[in-house]
Amino acid sequence: MKNPTSVGVSNHALFLNEALLNFVAIGRSGGAEYFEDGQRKVHYVLVIYRTSTRKNYIVIQDVLRQLEDLGLEFEQDLGITIPVNFIKIHMNNEVARQLINAYDIQKEYLDDFNYTDPNPRDCAFFKDPLLTRDPFANESIETLSVNKMRIIFRMLKHVSFGPEDDMHGIEKLKRKGIFKAAYPMHDGKIQIEYWHNDDLINERTLLAKYWSSVSKWYKVQPFNMIHKYYGAEIAFYYAWSDFYDKVYYFPLAIIGVLVFMLNSAYFSRKSQRDLEIICNSEIPICGTCIFGSGCLPKPLKTYCGGYTELVRTERYSTIVFSLLSSIWAFVVISLWNRREASLKYRWNLYEENVKEEMEIRIEYKELAKRKIVNGMVTFEIERKIKYPKRFFACLWYIGMVVFVIAFCYLRQALVAAINIAVVKHHLYETVEIDTIIIGLNSTLTALCTIYYAKLVGAIGERMTSAFLPKTQGGYDNILIVLTFSLDIINTFLPLFYTAFLKDSNSNIPVRSGSWFYGYDDCDPYPCLYQLQIQFLIYLTLKTLIEKIFVIIGP
């Protein structure tokens, strides 16, 4: 008699009914990375609520039967803290060899490429033993766990659960609540017991030992091992982060420190004498003036602190540093393109990228004609351009841009209205109201910018779908352009307004100017002072809010 934890077509009904109750009674807890025999590795896991198991056992049975007919093997475990079933999936090498071509899985490595460090003794202090390993040595395309996970992922993506053409895919099953989750399995637990023997520990433990530890922050990252274990997307993320830190952050940080030291030296020698005139002066400064209501007068010395900070930063060396940063950004892009091309060649990704770009999106595969060419399933669709929907999408995009611009001006009008109310009611006599208004304006701008930035991704996806791109490559390109452009406008328009437009409508003390914008000025400071405060508050709040979101919902 078969073990009740092994799932087969012949005992699906038993597994989903009587055996399940017995399994719960035994109280066996799951989570192992291998089947009970200790030989077959778990490559993928399906998670099902126990209530769903009882209600939808016919659908689940049909899905598992289809996957088993394709050669997958199953075993179940029970959740410890929540009432779920874990369906563990294994694919053997023979099945993987047969399905590699059918699912168009390409090798993400080169057979004749040397993946080891050619000069391990150069700067050895910054290198670890993973750089001397060839992670793809003695590997074949069908034995790599990541390739088996890709095959299973594509199986689940197209598995049918009903007679209709659109009734397929694990994502729809998850939305219906039949399955709770589906995810690939790690390469076993971190093997603490074999920590000091690199020949016995698995790849996950190797990465934990030599890469993900905080104590290894200064080491060269083992991108080949990261790519083998996590895949290309994760590897490119860390490759870009490492590249950014080395060629952009590091040089500019050194230059920035030198500029700060130069400004401080100039300030200590010359600027102190000039600031004494401001800091000791009792000359009244009108400040904001409202026609018929007077002005907001204060002695010049009350602005000593702001002008001191301006003198420290508003120098030619700061302007040169800004220009160098802009020029260096273009150099960095060119250097990264070369680095990206090198990694794509090393990991054999050029052909895979072309295929992904030409792949028809899942939303249109339901309407596409299926063809089998050389044993591979392909899809063809008619190229009908629906101009009305694309015209509507263009209007939607223009409307979002106009909304961001209009909201920026309305926000400034609100701050100007508050400033007018302060002068009319003489609130400036009791508090440092001008400083509060600057801080309020900057905080309000930062919060609105951060909130809208959280919505940009979802707005970009909906807008891209409205453009009706047929291929995945077209979808990705349109999504990047729309999302990036909206995010750029949202982030930099308030800064651009403060730097170049804030004083353009101010015509005080005469009654002129447009609506509240006639009182929207930077006096008595230059607009650079408000720009610095605005940028500082934006970066601070953005960092804090992102950290809070990570803590609340990681």
Image (cartoon, rainbow, N blue to C red):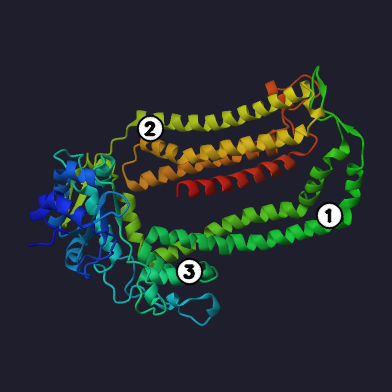
Q: Relative to 133, is 355 on the left or the right? A: left
Instruction: Tell me the tag on residue 221.
Output: 3
Q: Which mark is residue 409?
A: none
Residue annotated with mark 1: 267
**How many residues crowd mark 3 within 10 Å: few (<14), some (14–19), many (20+)?**
many
* Front of the two marks 2 and 1: 1
What is the three-letter code of the residue carrying label 3? Gln
Residue 477, position as x, y percentages in the image: 41, 46
Identified by mark 2, the residue type is Arg
Above-or-below relation of 118 to 521: below
Indicate the amino acid at tag 1: Phe
Q: Is residue 481 visible?
A: yes
Of callouts 3 and 2, which one flags the residue occurring earlier in the amino acid sequence? 3
Q: Residue at x 30, y 45 (%)?
A: 361
Q: Quadrant of residue 145?
A: bottom left
Q: Left or right: 228 with respect to 67? A: right
- How many neighbours does mark 2 have within 10 angstroms: few (below 14), some (14-19), or many (20 or more)? some
One can see residue 123 in this view: no
Which residue is farthest front? 25
Residue in the image at 77% along x and 60% along y: 261
Label at residue 390 = 2
Q: Nearer the viewer, residue 421 or 370?
A: 421
Mark 1 surroundings within 10 Å by alpha-carbon count, few (fewer than 14), some (14 through 19), many (20 or more): some
Q: Position of residue 136 (x, y in %)?
A: 33, 73
